Amino acid sequence: MKKRTLWIVLLCLALMLSGCGAGTEAGLEQERLADTSGTAAQVEQAEASPSDVEAAETSEAEPSAETLPEACMLWYDARETGGATERLAFDVPLAARADDGVRFDEGYSVRKTDGTYNDLALDRTQQGDFLESLSDAVRQEGSSGQLSWAGEAYHALTIDVTDGMMPNVASPFGGVLRLNVSGDCYVDGGGADYSCFEGFDCVLITGEGSLRFENTAGLECGGGMLPVPAVVVDGDVDVCCENFLAQPNEGCGLTVAVLNGTLRTDLLRWRNGDMLIAGGVMTARSISTFNPITVTCRGGVLLLDWPSDYEMTFVLSGGEAYLAGPLNEGTIVESGAGILAAQDVSAAEIHGDGASVLGGEEAESWYFQTTYSEDWINAADLNGFTWDALTLADAGGGWFAGTLTMENVTAEELLPWGALWLRLAGENTVSGEVGGTGLLVEGDGAISAGNLNLWGWGGIHHPAFALRGASVTTGGFGMGCNSGEAGTFEVSGGSFTCTGETWMQNAAMTVLDGEVRFDGPCNLDSGSVVIEGGTVVFAEGLWLGNGDITVTGGEVIVPGGADGLIAENGSVRIEGGTVREP
């Protein structure tokens, strides 16, 4: 699904851009090497640092400008001519209005954590609070040419934020705010009634770390006069904000541009403006707009639960878009390159056939989405259950969104409407079945279930079980899907025990670490088994109908030793580790 590609784009230096500089009008005569995959910082909830997580990546064949229809050229060069200036592979000239990006003599303001409001002093000649007095995690940096868009650079109020709180600054005149994020950071809005970064034309978030918006109504910027997007995410950074209230600026139709990194939100809400995903990952539970909206997928991954009720246009020139809901009537899809998979696409008007645009069982989605409801928890007491809709993890070959934390609870069954990402604390019991299209388990607790059954349906052709910690015990385990395609069984930590029968229709079983124990029969109709580490016990042997069994590390305990590993129509290779009898 995700392969890194490097591609070379030839563009012409004559940059005669009007307004926001759509990619079809822009060009640079210089040859540039651009990594279009983007990098997405993994979220804290996935227990991985941003540098450890590979980003969302573009589709196999990078389309060229010559092969795309004109309708799919919107924002084609945006990532190569915009974002954090130092990332670009050419000397970016200053825009004619570069000075409008920052005005130190105008005076900024700040909303403090207690909700009070005051002037912000950026030097000793100004009255107000100094940044350093509000948070020891921030430091002001140089402002020159910090943001580029359409091949031109703008000055910006630039602040480094390192492992701590970013104050909620505001601008009386517009301009650009650039945040260089390092480590685990957050913005305190000062209260649920107050928005963050009001008055700025653009907020550029970059760096290497994570930034959470807390104690706020949301991120509200844009609506100004600079021809740049309202929000730009560009870096190995993970940005989490529950509500987006941004709007586009005069001369630029983009409200949000994700060029690298990860942007997670619950609700995208604005009156007008478009979206661009050119790299990295963007996820949203819903879109609420007052006007038609255009979403351009140039690269990276878009994960969307429910599209806007208003008319939407999807411009596909690369990357991947996975929608849990259907495309509504009036939706237009400009199909140039890439992937769009939705619950149903029959109501959409599809132009061209360069991209894969499929719905229902025909689609192949890698979005393990969860629609949370207390109805499917089926527990007499909901205390101990905590839902977080804004988490995101790359696991099982796809993307899990939304975490259900269980702490010392008892339930009759867990049958989610979609997949399930569990974080376990304490001892938990499900007397009946745990199901879904996929299951990701983390934490330091344990769960015991009567039966664990994962089945892929609709667009989920590859059901997944991924264990990254905690202890899972089940009386039986089954996995398969309507399409018959391969699922994933992966253990990289923790312990898994099946006391009864295990059956997988078609699966790639991988054990990297941890403890795995199959006390009953373990049968795979087809697929593969790879054991690289940990301890794996097959108390009644392992049977694989079609495929290979490979052991490169760890310890495998099975009656008969290597003879207890049976690949009916394949091979058994012992290349490392230990395979022994009980």
Image: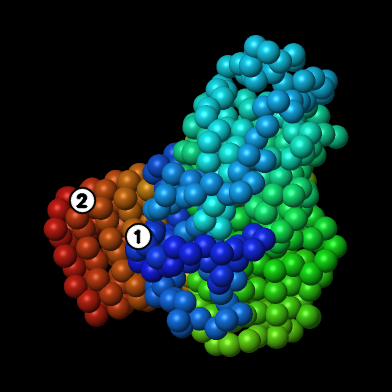
Please state if 369 lies on the left or on the right of 576 as rendered. right
Image x and y of residue 447, in percent: 55, 44
Note whether 185 is above or below 38 in the view shown. Answer: above
Residue sitting at 45 percent across and 55 percent down?
A: 38
Q: Amino acid at mark 1?
A: Leu
Q: Which residue is mark 2?
A: 553
Which mark, by number, is residue 76? none
- Side of 242 where 69 appears, left or right: left
In the foreground, 58 or 148:
148
Secondary structure type for disc 2: loop
**579 relative position to 496: left or right:** left
- Residue 304 in percent (x, y) is at 65, 62
| Amino acid marked by disc 2 | Gly
Q: Nearer the viewer, mark 2 or mark 1?
A: 1
What residue lies at 58% left-to-right and 88% top-to-bottom? 352
* Quarter of image, res 219: top right
Q: Is residue 202 visible?
A: yes
Q: Quadrant of residue 218?
A: top right
Decide: is 469 above or below 482. Answer: above
Badge 1 density bin: few <14, some 14–19, many ≥20, Cα 10 Å? few
Q: Which residue is mark 1?
A: 33
Outermost residue toward the left?
575
Could you say where residue 318 lies in the image, as x and y percent from the top left?
50, 71
Tell me the crowding category of disc 2: few under 14, some 14 to 19, or many 20 or more residues within 10 angstroms, Cα based.
Answer: many
Q: Nearer the viewer, residue 372 or 278?
A: 278
Q: Secondary structure at mark 1?
A: strand
